[in-house]
Amino acid sequence: MNKSHPSRGLAFALAALPLAVQAQGHASAADDAAAETLNPLVVTAALAPRTADESLASVTVIDQAQLRRQDPTDITDALRAQPGVDVTSNGGFGKNTGVYLRGTGRESTPLLIDGIRLRSATDGAPAWQFLEPRLFERIEIVRGPRGSLYGADAVGGVVQLFTPEGEGEPTPRITLGGGSFDTRRASASLSGREGGTRYYVAASRLESDGYEIVDGEGDKGYDNTTGLMRLSHTFAGGAELGVLALRARGNTEFDGYGTPGDTDYAQQVAGVYGELPVTENWSTRLTLSEARDEQETPLYGSVFDTQTRTARWENTLALGPHELVAGTEYSRDEVDSTTAFDEDSRDNTAVFSQALLDFSPLSVQASLRHDDNEAFGEETTGSLALGVALDEIHTLRASYGTAFRAPSFNDLYYPDDGYFVGNPDLDPETSETFELGLRGQLGRGFWDLAVYRSEVDDLITNIDTDGDGFVDTPENVERARIRGVELATGAEVNDWTLRAALTYTDPENRETGKRLPNRASRSLRFDADRALGDWSLGGSLIAQGERYADADNTERLGGFATLDLRAGWSFAPGWSTRLTLENLLDKQYQTVRGYNSPGRAAFVSVSFGGR
């Protein structure tokens, strides 16, 4: 057996980045600008813009430059092996995908698009696999409980995608490309600003014949068509109105336990908001939104149509250097399905508040939220974070937070179909997390170290009921403990942009002493890109340790390492081309038992326009 230890190599890389930054010596104006990009503004952590240093949370920002350099086919390719992030997939484009933050479940990471939550009420998790990354300009990953800000399911953290707002003259961007697995891909967008009106409209199309995700079962294809619109207008008095609409639809093929099948799907997010400065210090914002998940699978004769409608009213009061936030939120889940659920709707009403206090060098962030859910009753969550600026470049933070995960409709009510059966006796999953972190900057670099421990009561996890791995039912694990260490670092040195992350996660079922399934024990990521005039070169090394596919830890999935390379060329004004080689060493691996991940692949694209 060939055993490798890629994490050792990354440890050297992580250590080398701050040294490389230190070797740069004295900072110039360019150094200062680079330092600003390495300490970006973060919105998700505190409901308001704060720098990464000020957010008092473990955060990762993937900006537009990174997205364009890497040009991921799937949004989760950008998330994979980021600090605290684990991604599993049932094989390639458009297949079931799970995102695990800090060892919590795939349903414990809410996904927001410009503040609007995208999810399936039946499954409880968002369909990450249907999102086109070229339509977004920024990703924020906030790790640690955020239940007191975002309600149910924000146990491991929150991921938010941001669309461009539109600035300057009308700017088009068109990208055409394709590659392995007979993949064809196109996207187009137009953005700009006219007076107080900002706009961004975009569309994309992806088709792929896929590959053999299950041995001997043939290629499984995928297609996706997405449209996106964002429009806002700011009036003379400062009031703002805006609208967001996104719809993705298509078809994905899968292996139905030896029988080929396919699913027609649609994902939709729509929202309208209004923001008004009531006084110089008080602003109020009202958001009305709807998220919809539709899936039809002829093989099983099943149709699922779930809707989540939400109204959120948020008020912000500035008191000198301090800021107070208070609001209320109402949401309603509805399920229309050929599957007979015992319940097909439920309401949730919440009130929340937050205080951001600045007693320089001490900062305090405190929040509290109370949820009243029709299905499982009342839950109260809260958090307290303290930060101390040790000097101009080092910030120490400590936090405590609670969160809960609500059982989904599938968890509670799904009828026995021979593969899965719901459990109406489930309790909500509750957690408390302690975290200690230290962040520092050095010239054109940064580093961030976090240590955390989560205690989870009534963790919801699927248990194999018949011993053959086919029939699962969700059960509450009485006690679980998740602890981990995350180290992230980055630098901009001599035209190089470097990022590295190392994650250790230890999620344990305290009843059995077994590792919680589907979580890798450790991961690393190293991204390196260099600008060479009109050319750019880069690569990504991603490695993950072993994981278990079952609660008894009898089905082990081995660790792996993959290497991606990329190159870009701006060959004329406004024109560029990009080549990406994925899994260059053709590593064969699985993150879900029985489902193969893509082998070696190559993709090329040509783009015109855009900023």
Image (spheres, rainbow, N blue to C red):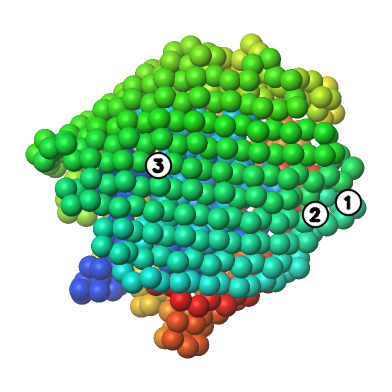
Task: Classify mark 1: helix, strand or loop.
Answer: loop
Quadrant of the image occupied by residue 315 = top left
Q: In the image shown, does 188 or 472 lie closer to the viewer?
A: 188
Tell me residue 432's x, y (percent).
Answer: 42, 24
> What amino acid type is highlighted by mark number 2?
Lys
Which quadrant, please, contains the N terminus?
bottom right
Mark 1 crowd level (few <14, some 14–19, many ≥20, 10 Å Cα): some
Question: Quadrant location of the C terminus?
Answer: bottom left
Q: Residues within 10 Å of mark 3 (few under 14, many from 20)?
A: some
Image location (x, y in percent) of residue 602: 68, 71
Residue drawn 49% across the image and 66% down it = 189
Residue 246, image x, y percentages: 52, 49
Q: Do the residues under discs 1 and 2 have CB atoms within 8 angstroms?
A: yes
Question: In this orientation, which residue lies closer to the viewer: 365 or 198?
Answer: 198
Q: CA distance from mark 3 to mark 2?
A: 37 Å
- Residue visible at 31% across and 46% down in the picture: 241
> Mark 3 vs mark 1: which is more N-terminal?
1
Marker disc for residue 220: 2
Look at mark 1 in the image and give the residue it sits on: 217
Decide which of tag 3 and tag 2 comes sooner along the chain: 2
Residue occupying image coordinates x 74% and y 39%: 296
Q: Secondary structure at mark 2?
A: strand
Residue type, mark 3 in image: Val
Left or right: 603 with respect to 49? right
**Which residue is labeled 3 in the image?**
272
**Which quadrant of the structure image shows residue 277?**
top left
Residue drawn at x 87%, y 55% as measured from the top left: 218
* Position above or below: 456 against 441: above
In this picture, residue 80 sits left or right of residue 278: right
Q: Are there few (<14), some (14-19), or many (20+) residues within 10 Å of tag 2? A: many
